[in-house]
Amino acid sequence: MSSSRKVEPSSAPASGAPADQDPEDTSSTVTLRTQQDVAVEVASLGKMYRMYDCPADRLRQMLWGRHLKNGYGKEFWALKDISFSIRKGECLGIIGRNGSGKSSLLQLICGTLSPSTGAVHTSGRIAALLELGSGFNPEFTGRQNVYLNGSILGLRTDEIAEKFTSIVDFADIGQFLDQPVKTYSSGMVVRLAFAVAMHVDPDILIIDEALSVGDVFFVQKCMRALRKLMETKTVLFVSHDTAAVVNFCNRAILLEGGRLKMLDSPKAVAQQYLQDLHAERTGTTAATSSAPKPKAKAISGDYRDARADMINGSALRNDLEVFRFRPDSNHFGKGLMTIDAVHLVDEDGTPLSWTVGGELVRLRVRCRTLEAITRPIVGFQLKDRLGQYLFGDNTYLSHRDAPRPMSAAAAFEACFEFRMPILPAGDFCFAIAAADGTQEHHTQHHWLHDALTIKSHVSSNVFGLVGIPMKSITLEVL
């Protein structure tokens, strides 16, 4: 299924509605010839609103404005002369400051707004999360809104009924399903909205900052579903989080003042966006140094951050709350090994419910075999709330030359000792896995997505996804 929306020369502005082009001007009529592998094509797209000094001017515009060259009121172009295309199966990031036209662009693509100039062509079913709970009736129950929102997104009643159980399981709002949506928290609303959108099986999914609400477990679930969807579907992803755009998207566009400033790789667009923000705030332009890089010197021995005592005695101490092991976390695997316990402990082996970034910790993973395992491998990965992997390791390299086979019904434990990185404020999860084989060729027997969670309350980390303890930092006069 495909649709095309364009401005025709005979269109006329309605009372109080955004103004279209001059009816005598046919220059903005656009006919799109979209290739079969293109999911969205935008050509010379523009959206203009009129701003009036007084209500009477609005009435004059409705009665006589179309016969005047400039009409009444001032023109405000939320978008102007935007052109780009998105291939099927591509994830396009959209970055821009507030007021740059991101939401207007998405609404034009969805068809909830009509363009003033230009045209949009889409191929396939669109599901959009533009606002939390958009399309929901607050007086209806969650159950009723599943059917209402599913119908709005193009599903038949029998299709919704077939997917209903899966939608409810994904949303996981429990007893509130049969309560009016007006009693829901914002997190519960986005759970239900996202669950419906994902089960529409859209060809094009549009997300506008919809995942900024919700607990860490639900956000992780959404990210896994998104990554799977992005393998075959088209996604438009709008976020102020440049790290998320770089991590998820194939290409990105930068909007500024309603115009397309840049279309490039996510990394290049994110760098330009951050440079523009820096220039605006400081009145300067970031410069790149051409000075030769000094050679790295080897660092031997363990160390603590030279500022640890000062930082840990201040409000910037990286306090990390450690939650209990979740054996019921989302998981997969063949099942010949199970992960029975995961603990973060101190040097004395005492389980930690609280620790500090930069301190030495041990991650202990207790496993059990159901059948004999020839080459067991236990590993972990630490993820942020968007599912981005920060770091991890496994036992394979340490025992590659001397495998430790396990008999059936054997209990064993893997232990990883490291300095906890300095984590930015937010939620993090340890994914734990138990496999059999080699680094390159192995069978996953038990993978727990969110086995252990950590909440970072405050942080001294300023840049990057994690911070590392600094052995020394100096500032000298040369």
Image (spheres, rainbow, N blue to C red):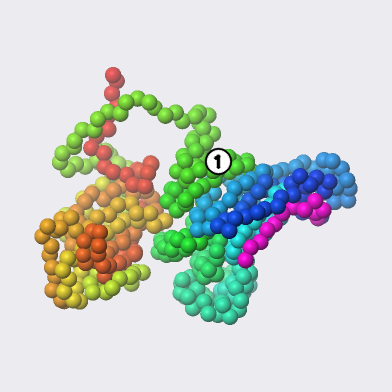
Amino acid carrying mark 1 in the image: Met
| Callout 1 secondary element | strand
Please state, as top left, top right, bottom left or bottom right, where the C terminus lies in the image: top left
Instruction: Say whether residue 360 is left or right of residue 321.
Output: left
Q: Assess whether residue 12 is covered by the magenta stretch.
A: yes
Q: Residue at x 31, y 47 (%)?
A: 422
Residue 402's spot in the image, x, y percent?
10, 60
Q: Residue furthest top?
A: 478
Answer yes or no: is residue 18 visible.
no
Q: Relative to 108, does residue 435 appear above or below in the rendering?
A: below
Instruction: Say whether residue 436 is left or right of residue 170.
Output: left
Q: Quadrant of residue 347?
A: bottom left
Please state, as top left, top right, bottom left or bottom right, where the N terminus lies in the image: bottom right
Q: Residue at x 50, y 54 (%)?
A: 91
Give the main secondary structure of the magenta stretch.
loop
Q: Quadrant of residue 374?
A: bottom left
Q: Nearer the viewer, residue 119 or 178?
A: 119
Q: Nearer the viewer, residue 303 or 193?
A: 193
Answer yes or no: is residue 269 visible.
yes
Q: Which residue is mark 1?
A: 262
Q: Which residues are magenta?
A: 1-14
Residue 68's spot in the image, x, y percent?
87, 43
Residue 456's spot in the image, x, y percent?
35, 53
Is disc 1 surrounded by few (<14), some (14 to 19) or many (20+) residues within 10 Å? some
Q: Residue at x 50, y 38 (%)?
A: 272
Q: Assess whether residue 274 is covered by the magenta stretch.
A: no
How many badges with numbers are in the image?
1
Instruction: Say whether residue 460 is left or right of residue 175.
Output: left
Residue 12's spot in the image, x, y percent?
82, 53
